[in-house]
Image (cartoon, helix red, strand yellow):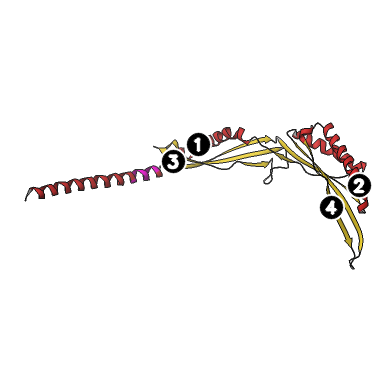
Amino acid sequence: MDNRDNGGLFFLGIFLAVGIAVGGYFIGQTMYNAKVALNTAEAKGLAERRVTADRANWKILFTNTGKSRSDIPALYELSEKNQSAIVELLKKSGFNETEIEVGVLNYEYQEYRDENQKLVDQKHNLIGSISVETDKVTLVSKARASVNKLIAQGIDIKNMLPAYRFTRLNEIKPDMLKEATKNARIAANEFAENAGVTVGGIRSARQGGFIIRDAGEDYGDTNKIEKDVRVVTNITFYLTD
């Protein structure tokens, strides 16, 4: 056998050795990953907070109605008077001008006809709106009761339900996530104790969305001042013997 044959056999041996080593590495790595994947436990952690709304949005509608188009100038004058009365009452209730927004007066025409399409009645409405956006959420319910008193003065008012919102979620997120993670570890420890193993570090974590609901309610998040905030995390922990 000449030197070329010996050289070929030498390199063939090296390639085989490298191939076996690489193949052994991947097989070993696969077995290691499989082992690691088996030695884990997934647990859920819950955190809840009772919070108070810090923002309120409230709208008041008022309407003045006439029987003919010629009534519109008088309706406009009356609407401006009603508008001023409502704004003045809101200020006395504790709201300032930056919290009160006066909307435009909208004109609405309605007509009523009989079965022969003969005009039997008509209405010319001027509808105004006043909005309140404030962080003085506790004043809103008192102000609503005061506004209703204007009805006794002959003002046609629609006192809309206010919307109460909690806008400072980012301020409580870190502590809630920390608490949810702690509760997940407690749950994992209970599982590990029964299995005779120990909880290690975190392999992966998935944060659920933060949910805000009116206190004590399953649906809705704008009707009550008191809110419940909730978050659930799913965490996978390593387990060790």
x and y percent of residue 76 in the render?
A: 89, 45
Query: Residue 235: in sight, yes or no?
Result: no
Mark 1–mark 2 Cα distance, whole angstroms, equals 71 Å
> Disc 3 residue type?
Ala
Query: Residue 22: in sight, yes or no?
Result: yes
Question: Which residue appears farthest toward the left when viewing the image?
Answer: 1
Which residue appears at 61% of the width and 32% of the height? 171
Q: Which residue is mark 4?
A: 108
Q: Please identify the dominant SS of the magenta region.
A: helix
| In this rendering, the label closer to the viewer, 3 or 1 | 1
> Disc 2 residue type?
Pro
For marks 1 and 2 on the same chain, the one whose residue lies earlier in the sequence: 2
Q: Which mark is residue 195?
A: 3
Residue 154 lies in the magenta-colored region: no
Q: Which mark is residue 171?
A: none
Mark 3–mark 1 Cα distance, whole angstroms, equals 15 Å
Q: Which residue is mark 1?
A: 185
Q: Secondary structure at mark 4?
A: strand
Q: Are marks 2 and 3 in contact (CB under 8 Å)?
A: no
x and y percent of residue 44 in the render?
A: 53, 41
| In this rendering, the label closer to the viewer, 3 or 4 | 4
> Disc 1 residue type?
Arg
What range of the chain is rendered magenta?
30-36
Mark 1–mark 4 Cα distance, whole angstroms, equals 62 Å
| In this rendering, the label closer to the viewer, 1 or 2 | 2
Q: Which residue is mark 2?
A: 73
Q: Is 115 in front, or is 204?
A: 115
> Disc 4 residue type?
Glu
Q: Is 193 in front, or is 199?
A: 199
How packed is label 4: few (under 14 Cα within 10 Å), some, or many (20 or more)?
A: few
